Amino acid sequence: MNPRENPETIKLFERLAAWTWSIIPLAAEEKISWGEQTLTEHLLLAIKLAGLCNVRVRQKPLSANGQESKTGLDWEWWIGSPGEWWRFAVQAKKLDWSERRYTKLNHKVDKEPQHEILERYATDNLAIPLYCLYNHVAKFVPQGHWRCCCEPPEIEQFGCTVTGLDNVKEALKTRSARTFDYFLRQTDTYPWRCLVKCPNKLRNLVAKRYGDKYQPLKQLPAEIERLRVGLAADDSDEPRENQLETHFQPGKIIARRLMVVTIAEEQDSPAQISQLRPLPRFQK
């Protein structure tokens, strides 16, 4: 096994991708409304329920900032290891499985395209703009689209894929390009488990797409570090309304949902990983 891999983390992201792949057609069959926000919140809860010490999530109450309708992003991800952290501003979109199209890809908020809000947020906060696509298609041959380092292809891992904002901007230029097939043809569209399974692929993806524009952080902001190590919100000396907000530029949009993933790197010792503690109410 590659010493950089954390098998439990990989299994979690694989399981959630497979669940997403299976739930989309079931919801459509039963005519159950199951949009991006519902899927995102179910994934967030499933991550928390898994209780992994190195994968943390938190969603702040809507009343904490009142900007849910204006964010242009569904959550923010911090992925890496001590000394190297990548920050992602993430917008989720669900495939209309009967049409194989992302019908809300050109969604507007107060007449402003959502992807422009996401881009502004990412630029203001030095985050990498990313789309997380929730998918299912009835018939699909993965050959030629499988870029994960694992073989053979696993179709259900396309349940959650990630792709760059530039791919979305190109797709929006042509209505016929807003499809599952279009995004799978892009060379930097991957199953989302690749972000936690292949740190080198993560680095190469960022370098290829952005060059030197985005550099990893050597240290997490204090609020994010508290979340990473497993401190509950009430463990901080800061006023509750200020927690997990001070790393955003004043006056800018705030991400409600956060995820921090500590990848077990080769240089990490078991002692370092053991310092990450589960919240008491989620202990197994």
Image (tube, rainbow, N blue to C red):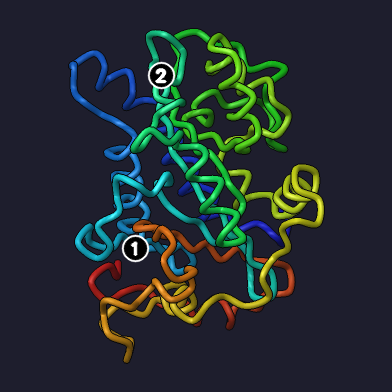
* Residue most extreme to the bottom: 237
* Residue most extreme to the front: 111
Q: Position of residue 219 (x, y in %)?
A: 62, 78
| Circle number at residue 58 | 1
Relative to 55, residue 131 above or below = above
Q: Position of residue 111 (x, y in %)?
A: 38, 33
Q: Residue 3 versus residue 169: which sits nearer the camera?
A: 169
Cα–Cα span, label 2 and label 1: 28 Å
Residue position for label 2:
103
Is 127 left, or right, of 266 in this rendering? left
Tag 2 and tag 1, C-beta contact below 8 Å: no
Q: Residues within 10 Å of mark 2 (few under 14, many from 20)?
A: some
SS label for mark 1: strand
Relative to 256, residue 146 above or below = above
Relative to 59, residue 91 above or below = above
| Circle number at residue 218 | none
The amino acid sitting under disc 1 is Arg
Q: Quadrant of residue 284?
A: bottom left
Q: Position of residue 53 (x, y in %)?
A: 44, 69
Is 29 left, or right, of 186 in this rendering? left
Q: Residues within 10 Å of mark 1 (few under 14, many from 20)?
A: some
The amino acid sitting under disc 2 is Thr
SS label for mark 2: loop
Residue at 33 percent across and 24 percent down: it is: 24
Q: Position of residue 193 (x, y in %)?
A: 57, 44
Residue at 31 percent across and 74 percent down: it is: 279
Q: Residue 19 versus residue 81: which sits nearer the camera?
A: 81
Q: How many marks?
A: 2
